[in-house]
Image: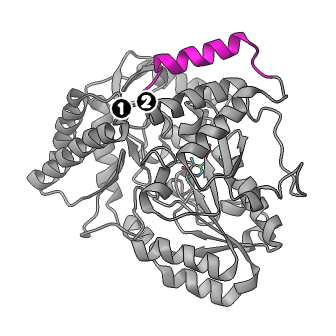
Amino acid sequence: MMNNKGNTTREASSFAFAEAQKHIPGGVNSPVRSYKNVDATPPFIASASGSKVTDIDGNEYIDYVATWGPAILGHAHPEVVKAISDAAANGASFGAPTLIETEMAQQIKKMVPSIDLVRMVNSGTEATMSALRLARGYTDRELVIKFEGCYHGHHDSFLIKAGSGALTFGTPDSPGVVKGIGQSTLNAQYNDIETVKQLFEKYSDNIAAVILEPITGNMGVIKPSKEFIQGVRNLCTQYGAVLIFDEVMTGFRVSKGSAQGLLGVTPDLTTFGKIIGGGLPVGAFGGKKEIMEKLAPVGPVYQAGTLSGNPLAMAAGLTTLRILDETEGFYEKIEEKSARLEKGLQDALNETGIPGVINRVGSMFTLFFSNDEAVSSFADVSNCNMAHFNKYFMSALNNGIYLAPSQYEAGFVSIAHSNEDIDQTIDVARKGLKAL
Ligand SMILES: *Cc1c(COP(=O)(O)O)cnc(C)c1O
């Protein structure tokens, strides 16, 4: 049995995890959930409501994982729950056109004006995989530039120097990826436009697309410099490559118009996921009409999905997007909460003298245990004190604060987080930092 050396016990979770490992690889259906890298037992979650999750031992945690991003309204938002249950009563899936799919497309286009046409899929991975195939089909080129530490899902082309769990578990280049496919992915450095320029100069007419997280979350939160993000846009335009913003995490998170609205840079294609499904499995990709019309059945690039545009998923996603769009001052309010958290954490760092850098964009944040003045590149993230992170993480967990178990991840504030939640989080953080 695990000894958590803290205030909470997780005996039921320990038993559940041991049992799960007999039947599911590593006991989990997605690797970071295993807590393997922090050498701990993950709490098994029984339920969640608002800003809190509750495990099967009855421990309650203030949640900053937010199901890895989707829960911007908090968990089990009554309107979303009702939308899902109403949809379920009408039949869970038809595999045929429905009215709500058009409403969803209209809602996305209203909030993100660079989208002329959009297609729904079932995950972020599927969205980026499909967007890349489309970009290749549209340009009749094969190479794609991605950035070290950015994560775009788990399909072959993007498991090259990938971020998030792939990085946490030391497998940014996964075995099983076909060599030829791996060779068509070129790597550049985030916030270093020279590395992108060099690749374009070398492979000019063969680069189909550049894909990036316009604000990263999967190596922790990093903001692009103006020169970098505008430089990438300019190079894509100059060389006729498709610029894909992977907004699976940032979409509808950092502003109503997503990262592209905030940064004022317009991609050719955008991928969505997470928030767009309101907690159900959804992704989407969309963009310029000229490119999107290469997709079957209009054009020759094939892409399909039995459950794509699923009525339950559309109901959850559309309800979520409408609340985000129509609630007066939503993004100002979540900014206020997030700024309160940032200030409290920064004060705690200052008081304790523990070296750290907090990066935050809206309700996405990472506390990097860094000795540097700023964290703006993959190299900066790699220099962080991972031992400090792990201790800090365990102290938070044992004191009722649920964070992602890796330095290479973002935390998420939801609209359901109260000032009391945030102040309690800051108190626990201060205690954790003091103990380092
Ligand atoms: C989460 C994420 C993905 C993958 O989405 P899944 O739904 O897990 O397949 C892709 N890109 C980014 C930027 C993400 O944050």
- Residue 252 place in picture, x, y as percent: 49, 44
Provide the residue designation for mark 2: 73
SS for dot 1 = loop
Residue 391 falls left or right of residue 105: left
Check mark 2 vs ligand 1: CB closer than 8 Å? yes or no: no
* Magenta region includes residue 219: no
Q: Is residue 274 above or below residue 181?
A: above
Query: Which residue, given by chain and number where applicable, does mark 1 sit on?
Result: 415
Which residue is drawn at the image coordinates 55% and 69% (left, top)?
A: 147
Q: Are marks 1 and 2 in contact (CB under 8 Å)?
A: yes
Q: Quadrant of residue 204?
A: bottom right
Nearer the observer, 128 or 391: 128
Left/right placement of residue 268 relative to residue 51 reads right
Q: Residue furthest bottom?
A: 201
Which segment is the magenta one?
73-93
Label 2 packing within 10 angstroms: few (<14), some (14-19), many (20+)? many
Q: Secondary structure at mark 2?
A: loop
Q: Position of residue 362 (x, y in %)?
A: 35, 48
List x then y, in percent, for residue 145: 64, 72
Foreground residue, 65 or 145? 145
Instruction: Please indicate whether residue 60 sits to the left or right of residue 349 in the image.
Output: right
Is residue 41 among what the camera can see?
A: no
Q: Is residue 77 magenta?
A: yes
Label 1: how many residues lie within 10 Å, few (<14), some (14-19) or many (20+)? some
Direction from residue 67 to residue 205 in the image, left or right: right
Amino acid type for the residue under numbered disc 1: Ile
Tell me where residue 336 appears, x and y as whole percent. 25, 41
Give amino acid for label 2.
Leu
Residue 356 appears anywhere in the view: yes
